[in-house]
Amino acid sequence: MIQQIEKRDGRCVFFDVTKIANAIYKAAEASGGHDYQMSMRLALDVADYVDANCPTSTPTVEYVQDAVEKILVESGHARTAKAYILYRNERSRQREMNTRLMKIYEDLTFQSAIENDIKRENANIDGDTAMGTMLKYGSEGAKQFNEMFLLEPHIAKAHREGDIHIHDFDFYTLTTTCTQIDLLKLFDGGFSTGHGFLREPNDIMSYSALACIAIQSNQNDQHGGQSVPNFDYSMAPGVRKTYWHKYRDNLAKALEVFGLEEEGLEAAKALVEACPGKPVLGDDNGASEYIRSRLLERTDEKTADSILAFTLKYARRETERATYQAMEALVHNLNTMHSRAGAQIPFSSLNYGTDTSPEARLVMKSLLLATEAGLGNGETSIFPIHIFKVKEGVNYNPEDPNYDLFRLAMRVSAKRLFPNFSFLDAPFNAQYYKPGRPETEAAYMGCRTRVIGNVYDPTREIVNGRGNLSFTSINLPRIALKAEGDMEAFFAELDSKIELVIEQLKARFRIQSQKRVRNYPFLMGQGVWIDSDKLSPDDKVGEVLKHGSLTVGFIGLAECLKALVGKHHGESEQAQRIGLTIITRMRERMNRESRETGMNFTVIATPAEGLSGRFVRLDRERYGVIPGVTDRDYYTNSFHVPVYYPISAFKKIQIEAPYHELTNGGHISYIELDGDPTQNLDAFEAVVRYMKECGIGYGSINHPVDRDPICGYTGIIGDVCPRCGRREGEAVSIEKLRQLGVYKNHNSDTIGYHGDPNEERDRRPNPLR
Amino acid sequence: MNQLNHITYNENGEAMVGEGVGFERIRRITGYLVGTLDRFNNAKRAEERDRVKHDVYHSVAGNADAHDDIRHSA
Ligand SMILES: [Zn+2]
């Protein structure tokens, strides 16, 4: 008689025949059986069989399970056998996942980021730090848990096998993607971060500092990026307040200098407060005239004028200086401050360009100049992403009030890669635009997300307080490969994948809806998300979340078209027509879902960090190496013309523009410029203007930005640094650096991000035509 | 640990800096800037240097009409 049984981990436990009986009974139940006695009889048969046949005295679990299957089949319990096998396979898959998870944990523990892909998967988490590794443990564990226990099996399978990709899957049960933060609303009356209350800011320095804190705090409540949709409008009041202070303080100084007061501050305060209107940068508002009349009660005209001239001169000068310092500090903070247990820099985006007030113009000019100057040692700042909003009548043409800033933005972008440019005149953005209401200006988050239309509440088609809830991408090349050139089969499969994604987005939304305000102390607790200020801490957030978007994305339209018709949309007009048909079909399905549910279902041109490599790897395993489809290490980003394909900038823009209109959840087009665009700003401007004329919504120009950290040269560096003459890795004499005037104490604290180097490697510059 | 400040001496006894320090090559990868210092190997850098270049600016200058068309057109 069997005494013991050997478990999978090698431990031996007492053999218990009722356990076998229970397992058989469970399987029988699954197929409608209820006879426990029968289960026990079968279990005893199994025990007898093992006793008689097992080559060792201690059988393994596997051996016993094989025996159960054999006995069930041979005794005519086919359906129970089938259920038992299914159960066994499922258990074994779960065990494998646990083993896989432990293997992942082992690698995370003992490998550095250079060796370990997972540690580099999220570009801006430093996987080598303690907190970074702890985050990865959590992230990997959450993914396994979500796959095993939350996803419907058919959705889990589609995600696992690469038909679709559920983005930010580790956060599946936790939160939403991103928000466009209305800073002015947040600042009004002050706010709380959970670590203390911050008073309403009172000058530009605190406006900028609080902007960073808001971005940082909100980043802790979400997994995506944080965007300020109208940074210019948000900072302008800070400049106004600074100017008042500077005006008052310099008036006080002048009163002392010109001998009218021993202590000038109280007198200056009284004078300024009695003014009919407050003086601002662009408009004195009658303050000087009033103060002059009051001064003349005590002194002569010449002195009064001198006092006022002094006041105005230094109020302006100090305001300008303070604003520049505030913007410099902001850029510095956004590149160094951390959120999420200190392991990640927030993804920050700032949109600006349209506020024509002198205060906002000063903010933008300062921010751009600080960005152009670079960080401490002249390094290019990685954050924030700047988005300059281009608008006719505001900044697009030479006669427009902010045209000078548009020019400056291009100059800075030619040196530092930011700003990107968004186009408010593109018809799909212009439809929301209402003059004098900055919240109706389309904005972009991070690398492309866009949320402005609002099916849930058409009276509030605005950017403030809204964002994406979640998005899931479809592997387009896979569908094309499966269809083998059969268009009908392709579209049928595409439709079924869209349905699958909609089902999954809704399931995720149901989980998100169950969360309560207190789960998001900043996002909801401080009223950052639209209408969350009307909720109390224990209220569920489902209803207000409906202002957000649920989004389907796609990868590899180019490879999809290659697989379907042998050419991609950069190569053939026929392919372009099919490409547009595919994305139109996705959009129309999402529009229909929006109409039927009253929620914002949209289409995004997926950014694809990390993901495009995964899809192609899986497809290559399945379909082999297919030229133009699976023969590179990545699938092309969304609707882009492949980076390796030689095409002029203008042609590329023409081809990609129509997709911007279709992808209402977000989009971007890139142009690769060769050489140093700071040497030819006209070419840079020509590209940006052409984007605008073609109906691009959001665009950006890539060019090499190299830097020698030793001499600080920034520009294009070939083999040899044009400034100090050293080669990569070579030393240069300190004397030479001194002669160049560039020797100083350097520090090497630069930050970097991993993306997909394979994709980057293949990029080719686009000639302009 | 600050390699940028690490001073070495050459055969003439001159103080040198920069030994082992590479160039930083900032690129945009899926929307975010990437500081490539220490990230890419030499082969990738070499490959990047080998990229086909197009005469971008000449083509603008040589096509002044198209260029003017899109400039300042409202
Ligand atoms: Zn140098």
Image: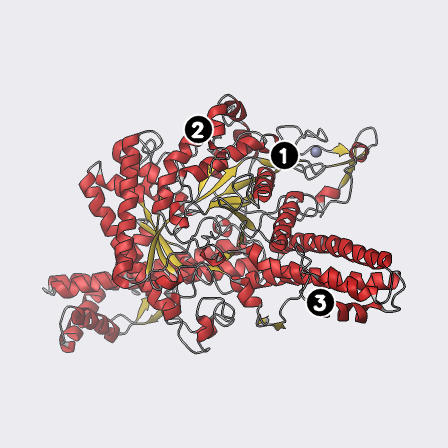
Q: Which residue is mark 3?
A: A275
Tag on residue A597?
none
In the image, are marks 1 and 2 on the same chain?
yes
Question: Label 1 to label 3, Cα distance in Å?
Answer: 51 Å
* Host chain of mark 1: A
Label 1, secondary structure: give it: strand
Up the image or down, A499 lies above or below A760; here it is below
Report the front residue among A667 and A369: A369
Residue A135: x and y in percent read: 51, 60
Looking at the rendered structure, the kind of residue marked 3 is Cys
Circle 2 residue = A648
Q: Earlier in the sequence, mark 1 or mark 3?
A: 3
- Looking at the image, residue A277 sits to the left or right of residue A758; the answer is right
Q: How many C-alpha atoms fall within 10 Å of the one at disc 2: few (<14), some, or many (≥20)?
A: some
Mark 3, ligand 1, within 8 Å: the answer is no
Between disc 2 and disc 3, the foreground one is 3
Q: Identify the residue at horizontal 26%, vertical 32% (top origin).
A: A565
The quarter of the image holding the N terminus of chain A is bottom left
Q: What residue is pinned by disc 1?
A: A715
Q: Is the C-beta of the residue carrying label 2 under 8 Å from the nearest atom of ligand 1?
A: no
